[in-house]
Image: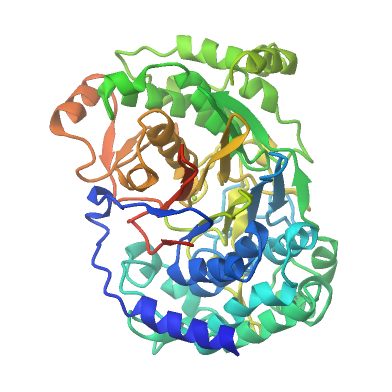
Amino acid sequence: MVIVAKFRQVAIAVFSLNIILGSQVASAVLTLPLRSKKAMVVSANPLASEAGIWMLRKGGNAVDAAVATTFAISVVEPFSAGIGGGGFLLMHSGKTGEIKALDFRERAPLKATRNMYLDAQGKVRPNASLNGYLAVATPGTVAGMYEVHRRYGKLPWQEVIKPAIALAKYGFIISPQVSWRSLPQYENRKQVILNNPAAKAIFTRNGEFYQPGERLVQRDLATTLEIIAQNPQSFYTGKIAQAIAADMAKNGGLITLADLKAYKSIWRTPVCGNFRQAKICSMPPPSSGGVHLLQMLNIIGDTDLKSLGWHHPDSLHLMVEAMKIAYADRSQYLGDPDFVKVPVQQLISPAYAKKRRQEINMQKAQPATEVKPIDLKTLQNFSQADTQKRNTRRHESTETSHLNVVDEERNAVSLTFTVNFGFGSGVVTPGTGILLNDEMDDFAAAPGVPNVFGLVGNEANAIAPRKTPLSSMTPTIITENGRLRMVVGTPGGSTIITQVLQIILNVLAYNMDVGSAVSVPRIHHQWLPDNLLVEPWGLDALTLQDLRRRGHKIQEAEPWGNANAIAVTADGTLEGAADPRGDGSPRGF
């Protein structure tokens, strides 16, 4: 078949390139954006981007391309995302301008309990929510992709899965780019893989991960994808579901046939707000991404960042203090809206942002211990009506994967999905090739106890059956005057929200092209721990000195994230770029 031949050729050609960007210098390299008049796909892997653009060339739309890219990523990025995980999708209609949000996030099994990761003394058992069968939540990727394609796709369902089947059946050549085979955090995940016979058989040989230049073939996964292409419900009610449930029962996992049968993706209302001349729409709870992205943008407000200059100490200080406030509120109020009341409109109220902005001392960093979530009674004073009135006057690391698509009609998709930590739970269901998530770690195992990304939570994010764990994923779509302006997102655990914030500011406030916007050095603060992360060579010595003088505790960290974005320029040209910190690549025509 033509599609099979094409992807065998692409797999060899793309991955035979010797990509020389190392992680130590990635943040110092500026990527030139790809420009195209018609359509574009950008993802974390060139083979996945090829899968998406192939659908567009065949007459498909942005949804067809996004679904094909998602399934391809599930094959070529098993360490970060896949059909054993879940995520969030935002879509924009070029015809009507409407933006919709789909939640296909993983959910806690029916047998999950509030204290399931605590020992007899009430202490959190180390790694119980990270490794093995007990860490797995009910996957949602297949259900989500079928739901959005069923409603909005143009090409046949079987057609959009063909590229992924070919990549799994015939394999792909592992890239020489620094990635899961060599980074220390994935080396540390090796033992988790070795502990699971099915995972060990797929991802290792003689106890070692496959190396760059070698071909990774996943025949069981190819068979599973062929079954899904014929009947996507097989994942939830058929042979695939039976295999998952049986393996769970055999090994102490919680997921049953009842969990899989009950799973449904959920259409939600996007969270939107205004920043300058742009309308910013992003993912609502159970993601915290959209709420806190808007909250930070509101606090920054009309501050003339461009006149100060990029990465001026004053603008950096303001951003960091805004980050602390947002992440403090996240710890208290964010959770699954089907289980707890999340005060979304109050948190994104410009009046609330104004109050919190007044608390910021521009000459002194406020210690994290003094930055508190505002009390609920005060927060309730910032009403939805106030937010709407003001708006009418103006406006999760390499784990996880993100992709963006814009088609010729200016329909757009921004999609982030994950298996959570590197290689998820380390569990592969025998005979299926499905690597399962460890998404249960995104719940608050106990109040105030940080998860693997250092994020803390409380009652709002406590474990409960069928509840969705809180996320930081921030797929975002930006419009100006009703027209598409930008689609953006990134992986990176707790850093996702601050990455998206900075990329948006780079484009809208500093007028960078998207290549520069996703490439330049970043900062990150998440309230706790009280450290300001900076990338190597990201800030000059005088800026660092100034920030330390204000009281910021600066910690240099390896470059993080793997963002990508597509912008629409003033003349209607599409401009796409992928982060030089990763393997990603844009494709256009």
Instruction: From the top left corner, tell me how far across and down residue 108 is, in percent.
Output: 72, 55
Horizontal placement of 394 versus 572: left or right?
right
User: Which residue is rendered at x = 33% and y = 56% of the image?
Assistant: 581
What x and y, as percent, mark residue 274?
Answer: 58, 24
Q: Quadrant of residue 294?
A: top right
Residue 68, picture quadrant: bottom right
| Camera sees residue 406 | yes
Closer-to-camera residue (402/157)? 157
Image point (46%, 40%), residue name: 571
In the image shown, does 85 or 366 lie closer to the viewer? Answer: 85
Q: Is residue 582 above or below residue 102?
A: below
Q: Which quadrant does the N terminus fall into? A: bottom right
Residue drawn at the location 33% of the way across and 83% of the way down: 213
From this view, report whether residue 514 is shown above or below residue 69. above
Q: Nearer the viewer, residue 562 or 378?
A: 562
Q: Is residue 353 left or right of residue 387?
A: left
Scheme of image coloration: rainbow
- Does residue 365 sit above or below 341 in this rendering? above
Residue 346: % across, % down: 67, 20
